[in-house]
Image: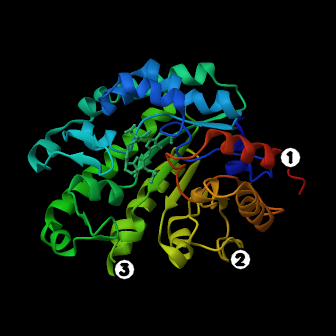
Amino acid sequence: MTILKEILEKKNICKSIWFMRQAGRYLPEFREIRKKNPDFIKLCLNSELSSEITLHPIKRFNLDSAIIFSDILIVPYSLGQSVKFIKKSGPELSNFNLESFLDVTENQFSKTLNPVYKSIEITRKKLDKKKSLISFIGAPWTLLIYMLNIKKGGNKEVDITKLKKEKTTIDKILKKIITFLCVHIKNQIDAGADIVQIFDSWAGLAPVEDINEYCYIPNLKIVDFCKKEKIPNICFPRGIKEKYYEFNNIVRPDGINIDYEVDPDWVRKNLRNVVIQGGLDPKKLLASESEMLEGATKYIQAFKGIPYIFNLGHGLLPETDPDRVKKLVEFYRNFDE
Ligand code: 1CP
C-alpha cells in the first residue's frame, strides 16, 4: 500500500511529505525541457517528457509522492478551448463556445487525454512501490473562472455582472464538466494513480451567497463519486477562510489541504474526521532559513499525534531555490516529535 493511501484510508500516523507544484518552474531541469518545448499543452501531452518531469523532484528530494505533470486547464482544452500561457499574465483561453463544448463526447475527451494516462502508466512503473502517484483535477468553479474569463481586479475578485449574465451557460457547463471530471479521475486511477487531489484554487472568489452552488456542491459530487469508486481524495478549497469548517462538514473529503490564511491550531480544533495536509506559506521558502524552519515547526507541532501530510498552503513559487526545498525536506525527516 502506498504511503498516502495508508494515511488517508487507514488514518495511520506516518511521516509523509510532498509539495504542490513540486515539478516545474523552480527546477533548472524543468526549465531546460521547457525551453525546447514552447507549447505548454503539447508538453503536458508528451507522455515520456511529462513522466520525466514528474520524477524530477523525486530524484532530487526523495519525496514520498509524485504528482503527475499536467495542468488543470488540460480539461477545458480537451473540451474544445485552446489554451496559451502568457509570461507574467497567466493562462489565456480562446472564447468559450457552448455548442462545441456540448458536442464533445466522452470518447473524444478520453482520447485527447490519453497521453496523460500513458504518462501515469510509465511513471508508475518507474516509481518506488511505497510512493504515491497523485492525479489531479481543477474543481468546476476554478475551471469556470478560466473558461469564461471572469476574474478581474488583479486576481482579487470575479466579475459578478458577467457571472449573473452567464447563469444559464454556467448551469450547462457545470452539469457536463462534473461528469467529465469524474471520467478524467477514473481514467487516471485506472492508469495507475492512487490518489486524486481536487484543486479549487479560486474557491475564495466564489460570491458568499453562491458558495454552496459553485464550491460545496460541485466538490461534494466529485468526492461522492470518488467514495463510490473507493478513490482516496484530497480537496483544496483555497481562500475560503473559516468556511473551511462548513466545507469539510458538507463535502467530507478523505483529506483537506489547508492554505496559509487559516490558523493551524484553529484547524486542529475545528476540522474533524478528515486528514489535514499542508499549510506552510510558500513565501517562507524565500525568507531566511530560520524563518522557514520555524514556520514548518508550527505546522508539525500543531498536528502532533494525528495523521498529517506535510505540504504547503499553495504551490511552490517559481523563484524558490531548490536547495531550500532540500533543507526543508531534511528538516522534516529529522524532526523529532
Ligand atoms: O510557463 C510554464 O512553464 C508553465 C508553468 C506551469 C506549470 C509548471 C503551468 C501553467 N502549469 C504547470 C504544471 C501544473 N499545474 C501542475 C503539475 C506540477 C506539479 O504540481 O508538480 C499542477 C498540479 C498544476 C495545477 C494548476 N494549474 C492549478 C492548481 C494549483 C495552484 O497552483 O493553484 C492552477 C490554478 C493552474 C493554472 C495555471 N497553469 C499554469 C499557470 C501559470 C496557471 C495559473 C496559476 C499559476 O500562476 O500557477
Classed neighbour count for the residue bearing mark 3: other residues with Cα under 10 Å, few (<14), some (14–19), many (≥20): few
Q: CA–CA distance between discs 1 and 3?
A: 42 Å
Labelled pair 2, 3 in contact (Cβ < 8 Å): no
- 289 or 97: nearer the viewer: 289
Q: Is residue 163 left or right of residue 293?
A: left
> Mark 2 or mark 3, which has the lower sequence index?
3
Residue drawn 45% across the image and 21% down it: 49
Asked if residue 14 shows in the view, the reply is: no
Q: Nearer the viewer, residue 154 or 195?
A: 154
Q: Which amino acid is tagged 1?
A: Asn
Which quadrant is the N terminus positioned in? top right
The answer to which quarter of the image holds residue 174 is: bottom left
Question: What residue appears at the point 34 percent right and 30 percent down from the top-left corner?
Answer: 113
Secondary structure at badge 2 equals helix
Task: State the mark number for residue 49.
Answer: none
Q: Quadrant of ligand 1?
A: top left
Q: Which residue is mark 2?
A: 269
Report the Cα–Cα distance between label 2 and label 3: 24 Å
**Mark 2 to mark 1 CA distance (whole Å):** 26 Å
Coordinates of residue 160 in the picture (x, y in percent): 22, 74
Question: For the point 69% across and 37% down, which residue is it?
Answer: 63
- Whether residue 322 is situated above or below residue 10 in the rendered picture: above
Residue bearing the label numbered 3 = 208
Q: Position of residue 179 (x, y in %)?
A: 32, 48
